Image (tube, helix red, strand yellow):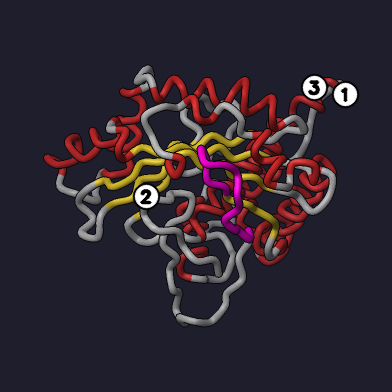
Amino acid sequence: MNKAHEIDSPDKITVSAGPEAGVASPTAISTAACKVNEHCVGDHWTVGDVKLLARLIAIIAMGQAKHAARIIVDLQPAVPALTIDVLRADAKQRLTVTGETPEKQDAHRWHRDGLIFEAISWIAARQGAAANVLMREPHISATTQGLDGLMIELDEKGETVVRATILEDKCSNDPRRKFRDEVLPAFRNYHAGRRASELVAATSSLLDGRIPDEAVMEAAGRVLDMAFRAYRAGLTINPNHDSELGRKALFKGYEGLEKITGAQRIGATFLPPSELRTWFDEIAGRAIAFIDELGEDDH
């Protein structure tokens, strides 16, 4: 299990010891710190336990991310809490490429792969999250707009926000273009305060029930303070980007988010085991096969 970075390096968060401290446990995504440049810290993701990963993706697609978080944190068996027929059918549809024409199929495949990658990003963060870390659940609909992800870290008392990390995840064969033309502009909007109300609303929703109601808005307001702000760009890459030089070129321009430190700019990269589209088809197939097995168990 990977060691956590200290508080001034927000690409990792405290690792939960699990029920048997010191005993290695399977992780769906293997993560490791890596070098980018002085303006950005790096987080490198690869596939760990592919069977566990496929099951977690299936459970998330069935609308049960909260249960998936319990599986990850408490090392519970990777099975959904609910296996109702309509849930399984809906999840299979979300994980299956459809379309009447090759063009529509191609567009739907990228939407499907984007949802899977957002789940992978969430899993990578959730694996190392301590109890004082709150995360927005990954989207399960390709039509969902707005904030990709948000991770809030509270102090040891669970009362004060000590870090708010905004997540943007893009699945693409051209990660440099995605970072330059989509991720950075989105981050600049947040940095300039143009989406401040959205951030406060998302933060207050995460804090609801965790701290007294009268303290929620004051605590949520900290998300607007750059001293507690971090950004994490998550991108799919190919082996050409999988080096210090490759990552440096990939995340060029990140330093344009001014008045924050390099540790507040995180560049996360996911290297699939094989060609990107082929592998995403494979992991979707594994998730669907698991969902089908659940149906067999019900009969």
Dominant secondary structure (helix, strand or loop) of the stretch shown in magenta: strand
Front of the two marks 2 and 3: 2
Looking at the image, is 210 positioned above or below residue 71? Answer: above
Q: Residue at x 43, y 51 (%)?
A: 9
Q: Residue at x 15, y 47 (%)?
A: 212
Which amino acid does the dot numbered 3 rest on?
Answer: Lys
Q: Which mark is residue 111?
A: none
Label 2, residues with CA under 10 Å away: few <14, some 14-19, many ≥20: some
**Mark 1 lies on residue:** 102
Q: Does dot 2 land on a helix, a strand or a loop?
A: strand
**Mark 2 lies on residue:** 134
Q: Splitting the image into 4 quarters, where does residue 182 fall?
A: top right
The quadrant in which the N terminus is found is bottom right
Per the model, the C-alpha gap separating discs 1 and 2 is 40 Å
Q: Position of residue 177 (x, y in %)?
A: 69, 24
Q: Position of residue 142 (x, y in %)?
A: 61, 30
Q: Which residues are magenta?
A: 29-42
Within the magenta stretch, is there residue 173?
no
Q: Does dot 3 land on a helix, a strand or a loop?
A: helix
**Residue 284 in sight in this render:** yes
Q: Residue at x 45, y 74 (%)?
A: 18
**Mark 3 lies on residue:** 104
Q: Splitting the image into 4 quarters, where does residue 14 fall?
A: bottom left
